[in-house]
Image (spheres, rainbow, N blue to C red):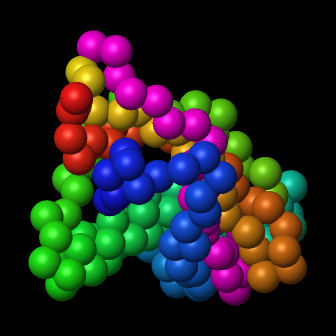
């Protein structure tokens, strides 16, 4: 997490990548989205996806995990410099969630986040509200996943 003063529209963070194996797809699906095309290769091949497909919620959960890990990394770096790390507030929500292309077994998705807007909260001036576009791109460079998230970001100082 960063402070408001350290954030600018257009800043992009590479969050990391994840390879969706058949085993991981099936394990997630068994627990959270037990549809045939997420559980069985043959059912996946017969579906619109054309192969064993990861649940969109699985793709979303991986993105969230990488967002959290990136924030933890930034906090550790701040502490190593002797700085007080920024602690973010809750997210008031997200919109425009899109699963654009199927994520199939064996696909490696690279996740990123880019700041689209940031403004100081009118009702809580010690906070800013950031909107960031989070995306996932497969190994062929195709956008497969996208959503616009909002998050409360602390200000270093309030005038």
Question: Of 36 and 97, which appears nearest the observer?
Answer: 97
Front residue of this view, candidates 47 and 123: 123
Res 122 quadrant in image: top left
Q: Nearer the viewer, residue 88 or 46?
A: 88
Q: Is residue 38 magenta?
A: no
- Give the image location of residue 17, x and y in percent: 57, 80
Asked if one can make out residue 34 in the rendered structure from this viewpoint, the answer is no
Q: Tell me where residue 53 appears, x and y as whole percent.
A: 69, 66
Locate the N terminus and report the quarter of the image it occupies: bottom left
- Residue at screen point 65% across, 34% down: 96
Q: Is residue 149 above or below residue 55?
A: above
Locate the C terminus and report the quarter of the image it occupies.
top left
**Which residue is rendered at x = 75% and y = 60% of the image?**
144
Left or right: 51 in relation to 67 = right
Give the residues drawn in magenta, as a range: 102-123
Residue 43 at what x, y percent from top left?
74, 66
Looking at this rendering, what residue extends furthest in the front direction? 159
């Amino acid at each position: 997490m960063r402070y408001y003063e350290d954030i600018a529209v257009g800043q992009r963070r590479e969050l990391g990548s994840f390879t969706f194996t058949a085993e991981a797809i099936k394990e997630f699906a068994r627990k959270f989205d037990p549809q045939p095309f997420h559980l069985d290769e043959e059912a996946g091949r017969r579906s619109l996806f054309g192969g064993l497909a990861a649940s969109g919620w699985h793709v979303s959960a991986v993105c969230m995990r990488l967002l959290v890990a990136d924030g933890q990394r930034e906090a550790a770096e701040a502490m190593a410099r002797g700085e007080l790390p920024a602690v973010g507030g809750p997210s008031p929500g997200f919109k425009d969630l899109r699963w654009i292309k199927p994520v199939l077994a064996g696909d490696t998705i690279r996740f990123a986040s880019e700041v689209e807007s940031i403004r100081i909260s009118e009702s809580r001036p010690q906070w800013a509200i950031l909107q960031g576009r989070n995306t996932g791109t497969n190994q062929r460079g195709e956008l497969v996943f996208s959503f616009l998230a909002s998050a409360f970001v602390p200000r270093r100082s309030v005038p």
